[in-house]
Image (spheres, coloured by chain):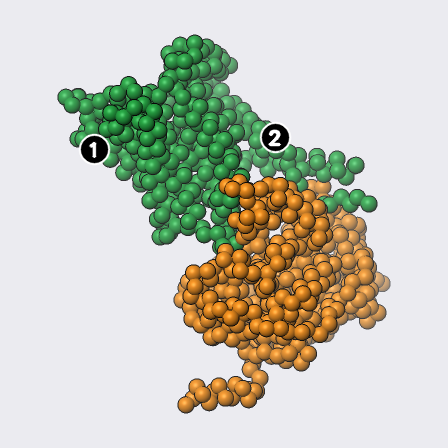
Chain colours: A orange, B green
Amino acid sequence: MMTNNTALELRRVNKWFGPVHANKDISLSVGRGTIHGIIGENGAGKSTLMSIVYGFYQAEEGIILVNGKECLIDNPQASIAAGIGMVHQHFMLVDTFTVLENVILGVEGGARLTDGLTKARKELLRLEKEYSLEIDVDAYVGDLPVGLRQRVEILKALYRGAEILILDEPTGVLTPQEADHLFRILNTLRDQGKTVVLITHKLREIMAITDNVSVMRRGEMVAHVATKDTSREHLAELMVGRTVLLQVEKEEATPGKTIMKIRDLSFIDGEGVLRLKKIDLDIKAGEILGIAGVSGNGQSELLSVLGGIDRPSAGSVIYKDEDITNSRSFNARNLRKIGLGHVPEDRHRSGLILSFSAKENTILGYHDSPNYNKGTTLDQNSVLKTCEAYIEKFDVRPPDPNLNASGFSGGNQQKLVLAREMENDPDILLVGQPTRGVDIGAIEFIHKQLIEMRDAGKAILVVSVEIEEVMSLSDRIAVMFDGEIVGELDAKDATETRLGLMMAGVKEDPTSEQLEENKAADS
Amino acid sequence: MIEVKSKFGSPAKVPAWVNLALIPLINLAAALFISGIVILIVGDDPIQALEVLFYGAFGYADAIGYTLYYTTNFIFTGLAVAIAFHCGLFNIGAEGQALMGGLGVGLAALYLDFLPSWVVIPIAIATAAAFGAFWAYIPGYLQAKRGSHIVITTIMFNFIAASIMTYLLVEVLIAPGGQSPESREFAELSWLPFFHDFLPMPDTPLNVSFIFALLLSGAFYYFVWRTRWGYEIRVVGQNETAAKYAGISPSRNIILAMALSGALAGFVGVNEVLGVHHRLILDFTGGFGFVGIAVALMGRNHPVGIFIAALLFGALYQGGSELAFEMKTINREMVIVIQGLIILFSGALENMFRPKIESFFKRKKTTTAARA
């Protein structure tokens, strides 16, 4: 019978948030012992659906069957009882507890903690062995790298007897190598008969690991296919509803002169931590320099120093042959005036004022430009016209200059920021995470804009944690690890493995240039 | 092809009148309802009390004069608290700033009365602004540069201001041979004209400060929403990280917003000292600075809203004293209870009805959009 090999089944699940129909008539069947991918753009309803399965939300209509039996899942406890475990995108761990303490959190088993701990330790060691999830159970979670923390989450779910494991965007914070390791673990789990549901928007992962894939678009399930019968292009098309270009189309770059020369740049943050260690970079006109790296390795600090938000602690920044490091004009406001555009990494925290209208966001950072001021008065008319022009050119939807920034989707918010920073005609553009949280359709557009700018002879620095994005956009790639540039290579020579190793801090054999430097340092 | 955008998480717009009028009215109604219950408990007729209150505030020319005179103070302090709010600051110190503003007015009027009227009055107004601004500048500076929390420092500065005033009035500025802590009366040339000086109406404390307050409300709107400086203050208030990213200095704007806030609060001194008492006295601020917080909250930091809220509180002050006078079981304290309830509902409990009302209107809007 079907039920014997179906671990999880959803029948016509419907969920509304107020007037928003977040999940429309979703049916899904996940085979036992398979890895099932659920793919879709941001806002397609993937997370909502999984929250229903995990009992955070309840569906208004539809039923959930676990192992062929109908289950009422109205809270996470019911879901755990049914054998469903969830690994969240943001880990739910207590940093100051050990792995063991974290795992038994909530299932301590009795008033005396020691009993529970002893029992849990035995069980945990067994699980580790069975699924090759090596981890020191007595290590403090706060000391563990991200990849291992995720393992703790998986162990937590397994310890609670999960037969079906749901992972929500599990690779967002991992290096490619860590991601590969995770995939190996998932494979082991599958081989041991567990069922894995993988939610992601990354096509690469779907192709690499899943057996079957379901595609969601605008709250609907648009396709169920076996992974071996599909392709990245086909899946992308299903997700977006039209053909998309996955590869950035671009000509060979013709680098001009160096617009920004960075030498020995160091930065110590407010807590006294050395975040940037002697960075050397040349950002050239007509070229895109990509910075790859796992997030938190100094990229954000690099952007904020170059953008004039934080002052460097040592080293120099030479802009158009002029050393501006110690000049009074080395601040965000003046840099904009002398031709620097900056698309920040986090548009919600920095790039936009969410409670302001699109119109008012159009002038953020440029609000004292004579274009927008008539004497003491802000020229509403000119601001509105500028905003309308941006909306038109960047195809922002809905095209409403008076809508608050929070009312736009991620991609459209990003377009608003990009429009502002690009249309002020900078000579150098810093871009942090150009497409974070942006739908595939908009990604294509944003990449095209960046290439066009490059071809117009502008210098562009792109920082991204998406290794694919760095590889396809950049002409040159520098890799950051722990505040250092561990290597720089031509995009043509970059492979995912090479970059991945560098992202983990492995330096390549020193080139002759570096050897000379070392000699100079030694003597 | 029109696509109804109904993506999860995107807020639909709520009509402006709901935000500016309906929600404050519902809050007010709730406060009055609870007040009614309290009045019922002490054994009086709530409806009659409401009638007396309303008549006391608006029923006759004198009443209106007094109501508007109180309203003037509330406009000043409401605007003062609002400008700080726009910069993300909670200025609890309007009371102390108003006192210092009054001190500035007093000093100018006492020591410059050899000058003609048209010179003394503008100077007195300017010193009110300068003294108030200075009194708020210090907490602003400490917040911006030293991270001392503005709420703590402004509260402290209220006490310091009160002590300074007491000292000066007892030891320095006291009228020669006077028995009570107050200065001599100012020369008449420095008095602000009363409304009853040029309008056929009974004698009330209502003076031209009221017009000044209305002009300031207009200026407030222009400054906050129509100039780049107001824009910067709002950016800092909404999101300091974004401000830094945009090259807008949070500390500069914090100091600026506080100084402006203090100057606005200082104008209470103009109304009270230069307009009504014509001498420096103790405690002329009478809690107007604190009520200003409620006024700003209720008025949603917008001059029009602030005017309406100020009028409401002006009416409560005036109608409330009438009520205490007219109805035997309702005393001054009971009036304060009613005021407190209004502050509670429109300030502290502001978000009690808001989410429900907003979601009602959002739903209504989206369904009509979906039908279209």
Figure check: A415 above or below B176: below
Q: Is residue A6 visible?
A: no
Residue at x 66%, y 49% (from the top left corner): A408
* Label 2 element class: helix
* Mark 2 surroundings: few (<14), some (14-19) or many (≥20) residues within 10 A: few
Residue at x 79%, y 36% (from the top left corner): B372
Question: Which residue is disc 2 drawn over?
Answer: B17
Figure check: B126 above or below A304: above
Residue B151 lies left or right of residue A121; in this view the side is left
Residue at x 66%, y 41% (from the top left corner): B12
Quadrant where the image shows the C terminus of chain A: bottom left
Q: Is residue B351 visible?
A: yes
Residue B124 lies left or right of residue B359; in this view the side is left
Q: Amino acid at mark 2?
A: Trp
Name the one closer to the observer, B156 or A49: B156
Q: Amino acid at mark 1?
A: Tyr
Question: Which residue is disc 1 drawn over?
Answer: B167
Q: In the image, residue B149 lies at what x, y percent? A: 38, 47
Give the chain of mark 2.
Answer: B
Q: In the image, residue B193 lies at what x, y percent? A: 37, 18
* Separation of residues labelled 2 and 1 (CA atoms): 48 Å
Figure check: A265 above or below A111: below
* Mark 1 surroundings: few (<14), some (14-19) or many (≥20) residues within 10 A: some
* Label 1 element class: helix
